[in-house]
Image: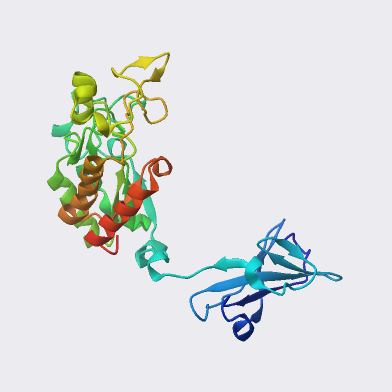
Amino acid sequence: SKRSDLSNVQLLAGDKYAWSATRKVLQMEKAWSDRQFDYWRVFVKPPYRRLRYAFVLQDQTTTLWMTERGFRETEPDNPDAFFDFPYLNSVDVFAPPAWVKDAVFYQIFPERFANGDPDNDPEDVEPWGGEPTPRNFFGGDLQGVIDHLDYLSELGVNAIYFTPVFEAPTNHKYDTRDYLKVDPHFGTNDTLKKLVQACHRRGIRVLLDAVFNHCGATFPPFVDCQKNGAASKYAGWFHVRQWPLAVEDGIPTYETFAFEPHMPKLNTEHPEVKKYLLEVARYWIEEVGIDGWRLDVANEVDHAFWREFRRTVKSANPDA
C-alpha cells in the first residue's frame, strides 16, 4: 500500500465449502516499508487445502474490502468473489532444493577464465591479456578452472554456473554442434567430470547452460536440412517457413534466436527433438554429476517441454 496511507490491514480467509465454520479474520503486520510503499503480510494454513481470501483495508476514516473483483464498502455475503486457491496439490507446490537458498554463484565464461592446458588451444589463439572481441580466442579451458578452485573457495563461492561448454565453433558456445561432447578447446567429458568431482570435494555445486531453444548452424541435423532441404529426415526438427533454407533481406526463412541465421530454433514439440534433448539433460547429471541446469532463452521454449524437462531432471537427481 502507499506508504503511511493505511492504518491497518486484515486478511479475511476460509474454506469456500465451509465458509461459516472456517471464516477467520487475521491481523496482518506491516513487515517493511520503502520510500513509496508499506508491505503487509500474514501466514495462513488452509484447513482443507483450499482457501478463499480478501483484504480488509482501513485508514483513519474508511474501511474497504478488497476482493478479486474490486473494492466493496461492506463485507460480501458470499466468498465467491474472493481471491482463490482452488486446491493445493502437493505436486504443484514449488520446493527448490535447500542448497540453493544459501548458494553464492560465480558465473564462468570458460574461454576467458584461465588457460590451464595450452595443448588444447585453438589454432588462432591470441596472447592472454589481449583485447577481447566477440570472435577471438585466448585459450581458456576447464583445466584452468580446476587450477583456480582454491581461489573460488576463498571468495566464498559454493556454486558455479558455466556458460555453454559443449562443442561449438564460437568462443561463447551458444551455437551448439554436439550437446553430448565438451568442446575440445575446453577439454574432454572426463575433464568436466574431474572438475565436478573437485568442486564437490570443496562443497561447490556445478550448473551448466542448457541451450535448448536453438542449436548452431553446424549441428548435424541442421546441416542435413541445408543439404537435403524438405526431404531431410530432420526437416521437422526446425521451424521452417520456406524451403530452401536461406536469408532474405536479413531475415532467415526459418525461425532462429532473434534473427541470427547461425542459431536455428529447435522444434521442442517434435518427439525426436524432445527425446534427444531430454537425454542430454539426463546424461550430464547421471554420467558427469552436475547439480543442475541454467536454461537459455527459456521464455521462448514451450511450457510442455519444460515440464517434461523438469520431470527428467528430478528423476535423475531430486536435489538438482
What residue is rendered at 16% in x and 51% in y?
Answer: 193
Closest to the observer: 168 or 243? 243
Residue 122: tell me if it is visible.
yes
Q: Is residue 72 above or below residue 262?
A: below
What residue is rendered at 52% in x and 74% in y?
Answer: 50
Which image quadrant for residue 290?
A: bottom left
Residue 218 screen position, x and y as percent = 22, 26
Total of numbered circles in the picture?
A: 0
Closest to the observer: 176 or 57? 57
Q: Residue furthest bottom?
A: 21
> Which quarter of the rendering shows the N terminus?
bottom right
Residue 251 screen position, x and y as percent = 41, 19
Closest to the observer: 297 or 221? 221
Residue 201 screen position, x and y as percent = 21, 61
Residue 34 screen position, x and y as percent = 68, 59
What residue is rendered at 70% in x and 59% in y?
Answer: 37
Residue 147: tell me if it is visible.
no
What residue is rendered at 30% in x and 52% in y?
Answer: 309
> Which quarter of the rendering shows the C terminus?
bottom left
Q: Is residue 160 above or below residue 82?
A: above
